Image (spheres, helix red, strand yellow):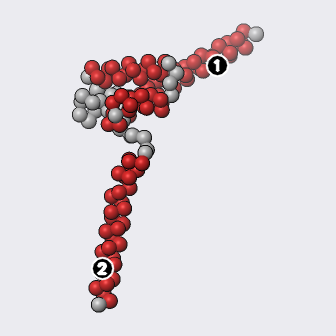
Amino acid sequence: MTKFKLIIFFVILNFLASNVNAEKIDKDKIFKNLRCLICQGQSVADSNSEFAQTIKLVVKDQIQEGKSEKEIYSFLIEKYGEWIVYKPPLNKVNLALWLLPYLVLVIGGLIIFLISKKRENS
């Protein structure tokens, strides 16, 4: 019977340790994806500024409140704008900004091809 209790104890301990680890990974992932608005080019994870410390506390509080990653990002984007996130959520404006250069290249290539084809024929 004591072996059974010992096995149950280690299973529960392992489960609790994995939950703590998962929470830490989520926080670290979020911190690395948030831009410090005070320090140029640094994430909140890398920065020691007062702003970064405040954002870390806000994220920790929201995780403790049970909010999801998406809800945390939405809150921060609403408060600070999309600039705070290194990987902003995909929306129509962002999609257009990403696709526009490729579209210009394709159209430009097509125009050059048609002009060269027209010159060959004449």
Q: Is residue 31 above or below residue 113?
A: above
Q: Is residue 68 above or below residue 64?
A: below
Identify the residue at horizontal 33%, vertical 70% (top origin).
Answer: 109
Q: Is residue 5 left or right of residue 26?
A: right
Identify the element where label 2 is drawn.
helix
For badge 2, the amino acid type reads Ile
For badge 1, the amino acid type reads Val
Residue that label 2 marks: 115
Q: Is residue 21 above or below residue 93?
A: above
Residue that label 1 marks: 11
Where residue 112 appears, as percent x and y from the top left, is 30, 74
Identify the residue at horizontal 76%, vertical 10% (top origin).
Answer: 1
Is there any visible trace of residue 21 in the rendered image?
no
Q: Nearer the viewer, residue 97 or 46?
A: 97
Q: How many marks?
A: 2
Where residue 94 appears, as percent x and y from the top left, is 38, 47
Where residue 88 sits, quadrant-wise, is: top left
Q: Are marks 1 and 2 in contact (CB under 8 Å)?
A: no
Q: CA distance from mark 1 to mark 2?
A: 72 Å
Which of label 1 and label 2 is nearer to you?
Answer: 2
Identify the element where label 1 is drawn.
helix
Where residue 118 sits, quadrant-wise, is: bottom left
